[in-house]
Image (cartoon, coloured by chain):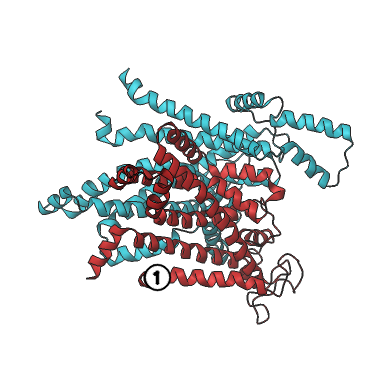
C-alpha cells in the first residue's frame, strides 16, 4: 500500500495531468487563430478549379464538420475531442482516403518509437560518458579539440545536419540509400530485411545521436568539472584509489543522476527532432506521415499524430520517472 | 569600446563577430541586387558557378548568389521579430511570476511547463497549417514568438527569485521605491546578460524552425528565405541532379550564421558572468 501511495500514485497523477493539459492545448491553440479548416478545404477545392453549387458546398461543409469533429458548441467539440482520444478514432485520412487515421498511425508509430528509443538512449549514454571523461581530463589537448569540434556541431539544427549527412553519405559517397526505407505489407522477416532496416535507419539515427549527444556532452562536462573539485574525489585520489575507478565509480556515477531528470525535461524537444530527421531521410515514421499529411492539408491526420505524440512523450516521461528511484539509492530508501 | 576590445581577445568572439558581420553585409547587398527576388527565368537555368554568376544559377532561372542575399536578409528579419517579441513576453512573465510569486506564479509557470512538455513543434505546424495563406515574414516571426517564450520565461523567473531575496531589494523597498522603479533600475541590469544570451539562442531556434516550416510548405514559398531556398532546391531534385551550388548555398549559410551566433552568445555570457571573469583573470596572470 505504501508502494502505491508514495511511489505509483503521484507519478500517475502527473501523467494524467500532462496528458490532460497537452490535449487541451491541442484543442484550444489552433482555435485561437480564428481560422476554419473546413473553409480552408473548400477554398482549396475551389482553387483547383472545381465549381460547386451552393447546396453542394453546404453538404460538403456539414460532412467535413462531422469528420473534423467541429459540430456543435465549443464544449461539445471539446467532448468530441476527448471521445476521439479515448476511442482512438480520428476519422478517415484524406491523403489515403478512406484509410482510417488510426490504422496509418498503427503502421508508422513502431518505427518512430524504435528510432526515438534507440537514439535517445545511445545519445544520452555516449554524450554523458564521453563528456564526463572529457570533463575529468579537461586539461588534456584531446579534450580541448573535442570541445572545439562540438562547439561547431552544437548550434546546427536537425534538418540542416540531416541534409549535410545525406549529401555526404548518400550522394557524394553513396554508402547509404538516399530514398530511405520503404515498408509494405507481407514483408518476410529475414536477414536481408534486417540489414535493409539497419542500413536505412543508420543515417537518421546517426544524426540524432550526434546532435543529442553534444548537448549531454556539454552539460556533463560542466557537471564533472565541478564534482572533480569536491573533497571526496580529492580524498579518494590521495588515498590511492585507481584513477579509472575514481572517474567511473566516484565522479561519473554521481554526475549522471541529475542528467536523468534533465532527460525527462528534454524529451519533448528530442521527439520533435526525431520527427524532423525522419522527414529528411524519408524514414517511414510519424515524421514522414506528418510531412505527407501537412503537404496535402490532411487536418485529421496531423491531429492524430499530435495527440499520439503527446501520449508517447508523456509515457516516456512516466517510465523514466518510475525508473529513477531504482537508479538513485537516496530516493529508493525514502 | 573597452568591452569590445576585451571580447575580441576571445577567439570565439572574434570569429563569430567577423562571420556575423560578413553575413549582415551580404544581407544588405540584397538592396543592390540587379535581379528581382521573386521573378523566375531571369537568367539561363542550371548553370554552374561562373564569372557572370559567381554561385551559378538555379532551376527556376535565378542567380543563386543574389537570391542568397535576399534569403539571409529575410531569415534575419523573421528571427529578429520572433526573438524580440518573445523576449518581451518572456521578460514580462518571468518578472511578474518571479516577483509576485503565489498563485499567479503557479499559474504562469504551469502554463510555461505545459508548453514545454507537449511537442511544441507539432502545435506550431497545426497553427501554421491553418494560417498557411497568410504566412508572410512578419506573421511567421510572430507565430514563432508565440511559441518561443516558455523556456526563457522560466530561466528569467528563477533569476528574479534569487534577486528578490537579496539585501538590496529590502533596502530599496524600505527606502520607499516603487515596484516599477525597483524592477527597472535594479533588476533589469542584473538580468540583461541572461536576456541577451536567451535572445541569441531564440534567434537560432527561430531560424531552424523557419527552415522546417518552409520544408513543410507552410510559409509563403515565393519569398526567399534560408528555408524556402532549401525547399526549392529539394523540390527540384538538386541533390540527385548534382546542382551542388544551389543546395549547398542555404546549407552553408545557415551553418555559418548559427555557429557565429552561438559562439557570440557563449563568449558574451562568459564575459558577463563575473565568476568566469575572475577565473579568466586568474588564469592569465
Camera sees residue A122:
no
Q: Quadrant of residue A57?
A: top right
**Residue furthest top as drawn:** A1
**Residue furthest front as drawn:** B176
Side of B148 relative to B159 (left or right): right
Q: Secondary structure at mark 1?
A: helix
Residue A218, horizontal then vertical, whole percent: 36, 55
Q: In the rendered structure, the residue with mark 1 lies on which chain?
A: B
Residue tagged 1: B4
Q: Is residue B105 above or below residue A171?
A: above
Q: Is residue B134 above or below residue B270?
A: above
Q: Residues within 10 Å of mark 1 (few under 14, many from 20)?
A: few
Residue A237, horizontal then vertical, whole percent: 14, 53
Q: Residue at x 31, y 54 (%)?
A: A222
Question: Which chain is depicted red?
Answer: B
Residue B3, horizontal then vertical, whole percent: 37, 69
Camera sees residue B11:
yes
Q: Residue at x 55, y 58 (%)?
A: B80
Which colour denotes chain A?
cyan
Q: Quadrant of the C terminus of chain B?
A: bottom left
In this rendered view, identify the residue nearer to me: A88 or A65: A65
Side of B74 relative to A297 (left or right): left
Q: Residue at x 72, y 30 (%)?
A: A67
Q: Is residue B73 above or below residue A79?
A: below
Q: Residue at x 78, y 44 (%)?
A: A44
In this rendered view, identify the residue nearer to me: A89 or A232: A232
Amino acid at each position: 500500500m505504501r508502494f502505491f501511495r508514495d511511489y505509483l500514485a503521484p507519478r500517475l497523477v502527473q501523467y494524467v495531468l500532462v496528458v490532460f493539459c497537452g490535449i487541451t492545448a491541442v484543442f484550444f491553440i489552433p482555435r485561437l487563430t480564428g481560422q476554419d479548416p473546413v473553409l480552408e478545404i473548400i477554398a482549396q477545392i475551389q482553387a483547383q478549379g472545381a465549381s460547386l453549387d451552393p447546396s453542394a458546398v453546404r453538404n460538403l461543409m456539414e460532412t467535413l464538420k462531422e469528420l473534423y469533429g467541429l459540430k456543435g458548441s465549443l464544449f461539445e467539440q471539446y467532448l468530441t475531442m476527448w471521445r476521439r482520444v479515448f476511442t482512438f478514432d480520428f476519422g478517415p485520412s484524406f491523403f489515403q482516403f478512406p484509410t482510417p487515421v488510426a490504422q496509418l498511425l498503427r503502421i508508422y508509430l513502431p518505427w518512430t518509437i524504435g528510432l526515438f528509443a534507440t537514439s535517445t538512449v545511445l545519445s544520452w549514454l555516449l554524450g554523458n560518458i564521453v563528456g564526463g571523461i572529457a570533463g575529468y581530463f579537461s586539461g588534456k589537448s584531446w579534450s580541448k579539440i573535442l570541445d572545439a569540434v562540438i562547439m561547431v556541431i552544437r548550434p546546427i539544427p536537425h534538418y540542416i545536419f540531416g541534409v549535410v549527412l545525406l549529401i555526404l553519405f548518400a550522394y557524394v559517397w553513396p554508402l547509404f540509400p538516399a530514398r530511405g526505407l520503404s515498408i509494405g505489407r507481407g514483408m518476410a522477416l529475414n536477414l536481408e530485411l534486417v540489414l535493409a532496416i539497419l542500413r536505412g535507419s543508420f543515417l537518421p539515427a546517426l544524426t540524432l545521436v550526434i546532435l543529442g549527444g553534444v548537448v549531454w556532452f556539454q552539460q556533463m562536462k560542466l557537471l564533472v568539472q565541478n564534482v572533480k573539485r569536491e573533497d571526496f574525489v580529492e580524498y579518494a585520489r590521495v588515498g590511492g584509489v585507481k584513477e579509472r575507478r575514481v572517474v567511473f565509480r566516484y565522479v561519473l556515477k554521481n554526475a549522471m543522476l541529475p542528467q536523468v531528470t534533465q532527460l525527462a525535461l528534454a524529451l519533448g524537444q528530442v521527439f520533435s527532432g526525431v520527427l524532423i530527421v525522419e522527414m529528411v531521410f524519408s524514414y517511414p515514421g510519424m515524421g514522414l506521415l506528418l510531412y505527407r499529411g501537412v503537404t496535402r492539408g490532411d487536418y485529421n491526420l496531423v491531429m492524430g499524430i499530435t495527440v499520439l505524440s503527446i501520449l508517447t512523450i508523456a509515457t516516456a516521461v512516466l517510465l523514466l520517472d518510475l525508473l529513477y528511484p531504482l537508479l538513485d539509492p537516496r530516493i529508493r530508501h525514502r | 569600446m573597452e568591452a569590445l576590445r576585451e571580447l575580441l581577445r576571445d577567439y570565439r568572439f572574434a570569429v563569430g563577430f567577423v562571420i556575423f558581420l560578413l553575413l549582415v553585409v551580404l544581407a544588405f547587398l540584397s538592396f543592390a541586387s540587379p535581379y528581382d527576388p521573386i521573378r523566375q527565368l531571369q537568367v539561363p537555368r542550371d548553370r554552374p558557378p561562373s564569372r557572370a554568376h559567381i554561385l551559378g544559377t538555379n532551376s527556376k532561372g535565378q542567380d543563386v548568389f543574389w537570391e542568397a542575399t535576399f534569403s539571409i536578409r529575410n531569415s534575419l528579419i523573421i528571427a529578429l521579430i520572433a526573438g524580440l517579441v518573445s523576449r518581451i513576453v518572456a521578460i514580462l512573465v518571468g518578472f511578474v511570476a518571479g516577483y509576485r510569486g503565489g498563485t499567479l506564479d503557479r499559474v504562469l509557470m504551469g502554463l510555461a511547463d505545459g508548453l514545454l512538455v507537449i511537442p511544441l513543434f507539432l502545435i506550431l505546424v497545426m497553427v501554421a497549417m491553418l494560417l498557411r495563406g497568410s504566412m508572410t515574414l512578419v506573421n511567421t516571426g510572430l507565430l514563432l514568438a508565440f511559441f518561443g517564450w516558455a523556456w526563457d520565461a522560466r530561466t528569467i523567473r528563477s533569476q528574479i527569485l534569487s534577486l528578490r531575496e537579496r539585501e538590496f531589494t529590502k533596502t530599496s523597498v524600505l527606502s520607499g521605491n516603487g515596484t516599477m522603479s525597483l524592477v527597472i533600475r535594479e533588476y533589469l541590469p542584473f538580468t540583461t546578460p541572461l536576456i541577451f544570451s536567451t535572445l541569441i539562442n531564440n534567434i537560432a531556434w527561430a531560424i531552424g524552425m523557419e527552415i522546417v516550416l518552409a520544408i513543410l510548405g507552410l510559409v509563403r514559398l515565393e519569398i526567399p528565405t534560408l528555408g524556402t531556398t532549401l525547399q526549392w532546391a529539394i523540390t527540384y531534385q538538386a541533390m540527385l541532379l548534382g546542382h551542388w551550388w544551389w543546395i549547398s548555398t542555404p546549407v552553408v549559410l545557415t551553418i555559418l550564421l548559427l555557429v557565429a551566433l552561438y559562439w557570440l552568445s557563449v563568449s558574451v555570457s562568459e564575459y558577463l558572468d563575473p565568476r568566469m571573469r575572475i577565473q579568466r583573470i586568474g588564469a592569465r596572470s
